[in-house]
Image (cartoon, rainbow, N blue to C red):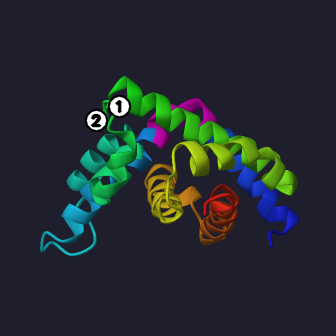
Amino acid sequence: MLSNTEKELIVHIWEKMLPVAEDIGSEALLSCSVLRKHSHSGRGRRLRSAQTSTCLCFLRYSSVYRMFTAFPKTKTYFNHLDISPRSQHLRCHGKKIIQALAEGARNITTLPTTLAHLSRFHAYQLRIHPTNFKLFNHCILVTLACNMGDNFTPVAHAAIDKFLSAFSAVLAEKFR
């Protein structure tokens, strides 16, 4: 599935994201709607430089919120939390997600074992439908692309996409 080079790249990317885990994680949950709003506003797909810098500054605060605004049905799993932009709950959950992704990247050869507790938790206690993991994968990819800029190469994109697919498959494994 993943080459050794891709595995090393994935570990490197997630280790690089750990210091800003709260921002990246909460951004993925938050900001898809911002990009969607700009791309459907009649201005085309490319944002002007002023819009881009505003968007990127805003995006640094919410990967989790990205998912909630682009895919509002996902909020139902978090109705007990304050999921407003920059809220402590949102930032804390975003950080947990990025830390889990980084742990999965470090233990990629034993991903099913590493994520067994999260798979059970998401399937039996939270009852999160596997489709939501795919939605979140998209939001994480967009967030990384926004934050990594030119460092988010096609090779990095492909490797992260493969990793997130494997990560999601493991999380969805116990769902029935």
Q: How far across and down, in percent of the image, does residue 121 sit?
A: 62, 43
The amino acid sitting under disc 1 is Leu
Q: Which mark is residue 81?
A: 1
Q: In front here: 47 or 100? A: 100
Q: Is residue 130 left or right of residue 119?
A: left
Left or right: 51 as drawn, with respect to 28 = left
Please identify the quarter of the rendering in which residue 3 is found. bottom right
Residue at the disc numbered 2: 85
SS under mark 1: loop
Residue 22 belongs to the span the image colors magenta: yes
Q: Secondary structure at mark 2?
A: loop
In whole angstroms, how far apart are the C-alphas of marks 2 and 1? 12 Å
Residue sitting at x 49%, y 41%: 25
Picture coordinates of residue 61, whole percent (x, y): 37, 37
On-image quarter of the C terminus? bottom right
Report if residue 7 lies within the magenta region.
no
Which residue is at the far top?
88
Reply above or below: 174 against 14: below
Give the answer, above or below, for where 20 lies relative to 126. Answer: above
Q: Mark 2: which amino acid?
A: Pro
Q: Position of residue 112 (x, y in %)?
A: 79, 54
Of residues 17 and 152, which is closer to you in this image? Answer: 17
Can the viewer see residue 14 in this picture? no
Q: Quadrant of the N terminus?
A: bottom right
Dividing the picture into quarters, in which one does residue 48 lie? bottom left
Q: Quick check: marks 2 and 1 in contact, CB under 8 Å?
A: no
- The reply to whether residue 24 is in sight is yes
> In which quarter of the view is residue 47 placed?
bottom left
Q: What's drawn in magenta, residue-wise?
A: 18-25
- 2 vs 1, front mark: 1
Whether residue 55 is situated above or below residue 35 in the rendered picture: above
